[in-house]
Amino acid sequence: MLKNPTSVCALAPSSRMLARAMASGLEIDSDESVMELGPGTGALTDQIRHIITDGGEYIGIELEPRFVGLLRERFPNLRFEQNSVTRAFQVHADSGTPPVKAVISGLSISTMPGPVIDEIIVNLDRLLRPGSVFRMFQYVHAYYLPSAIRFRRRMSSLFSDYRCDALVVRNLPPAFVLTWTR
């Protein structure tokens, strides 16, 4: 974060407790896929891989080239694309992976510029079909930021069900796990 604060917004990788909460209850069939936005160093990816049956059902989009290299070494059976999450729909379309059942985000969306947030929402709207899920975490200190509130309101207008599933205090910083279902 200190080396590249505009690209990396986390003080530390997500804790094992947060990663477990993010993957909890997700069921992915063999004809479905999981997309991870901003896998970083793979803290969430390590838990996500337990809910998929093979690497063909996963695609991670990471902007930072060093992280993409690290992820490809650490998880050789999973697919990682160096790209912007504002191109998530196109990345999925080009990948040949099955329809997306769940999008899991490790991004600090509340710190992003409004136009980027809008593009992420457009991509989620195009990617997720009925019965699919978008799950993210928001750090406690960012939960009430105007951009975070705006994001939650926009998402709730597009998705039928919104839940704040958990508060994970054993994370630096503590974070809420948020889920929208279409």
Image (cartoon, rainbow, N blue to C red):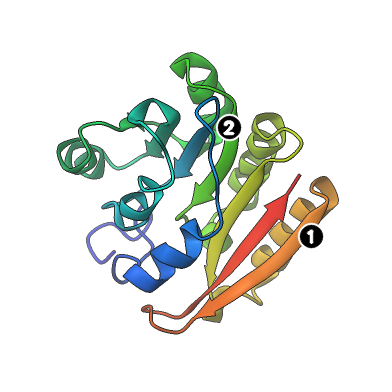
Residue drawn at (53%, 22%) of the image: 98
Residue 102: percent from left, percent from top: 57, 42
Residue drawn at (49%, 61%) of the image: 22
Please rate how many residues cluster around mark 2, counting C-alpha atoms within 10 Å: few if below 14, some from 14 to 19, many from 20.
Answer: many
- Quadrant assignment, res 176: bottom right
62 relative to 26 in the view: left or right: left
Quadrant in which the C terminus appears: top right
Residue 60: percent from left, percent from top: 39, 37
Please tell me whether mark 2 sits on a helix, a strand or a loop: strand
Count how many numbered circles sit on residues in the image: 2
Hey, what amino acid is under mark 1? Arg
Quadrant in which the N terminus appears: bottom left
- Quadrant assignment, res 164: bottom right
Residue 75: percent from left, percent from top: 22, 39
117 relative to 34 in the view: left or right: right
Please rate how many residues cluster around mark 1, counting C-alpha atoms within 10 Å: few if below 14, some from 14 to 19, many from 20.
Answer: few
**Residue hosting label 1:** 153
| Residue 15 appearing in the image | no
Residue drawn at (75%, 52%) of the image: 155
Task: Give the CA separation, mark 1 to mark 2.
Answer: 22 Å
Query: Tag 2 or tag 1, which sits nearer the N-term?
Result: 2
Residue 4: percent from left, percent from top: 28, 57
| Residue 50 appearing in the image | yes
Residue drawn at (26%, 52%) of the image: 41
Q: Closer to the observer: label 1 or label 2?
A: 2
- Which labelled disc corresponds to residue 100? 2
- Quadrant assignment, res 172: bottom left
Hey, what amino acid is under mark 2? Val
Q: Outermost residue toward the left? A: 73
Between 6 and 62, which is closer to the camera in this rendering? 62
Please tell me whether mark 1 sits on a helix, a strand or a loop: helix
